[in-house]
Amino acid sequence: MVKQGYKLATSMTDATVIAYGFKDKYNVYHVTHFSKKTSTGGSIAKWGKLEVMNSKSTTPYKSTSSYGAGYLAIYKK
């Protein structure tokens, strides 16, 4: 993300991109996907050519989700 001109954001208010994932038993973080924060406070993520998810939240996943329970890092341009 840094190579694309993004910096770590200090709050979700400042964020434009959200990285989701999980931490394994060795404390290694694994990013599973990214989403873009919308102007209404939600998020939009896209996988491949067809699957798009719009959410009214920036943390739309259950704690047991394979996509990751929450965000690992937030970025801003």
Image (cartoon, rainbow, N blue to C red):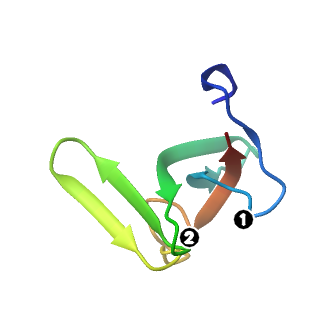
Q: Secondary structure at mark 2?
A: loop
Task: Give the camera-side residue of 63 and 48.
Answer: 48
* Image disc number at residue 12: 1
- Location of mark 2 (residue): 58
Which image quarter holds the C terminus?
Answer: top right
Report the residue at 56% width, 70% height from top.
58
**Is tag 1's residue or tag 2's residue first in the polypeptide sequence?**
1
Callout 1, which amino acid? Answer: Met
- Badge 1: few (under 14), some or many (20 or more) residues near its Cα, within 10 Å? some
Task: Give me the C-alpha separation between circle 1 and circle 2.
Answer: 8 Å
Q: Are marks 1 and 2 in contact (CB under 8 Å)?
A: yes
Q: Secondary structure at mark 1?
A: loop
Report the residue at 50% width, 78% height from top.
62
Residue 77, placed above or below residue 71: above
Image location of residue 38, percent across then percent down? 49, 64
Residue 42, placed above or below residue 5: below
Report the residue at 52% width, 77% height from top.
57
Callout 2, which amino acid? Answer: Thr
Report the residue at 45% width, 80% height from top.
56
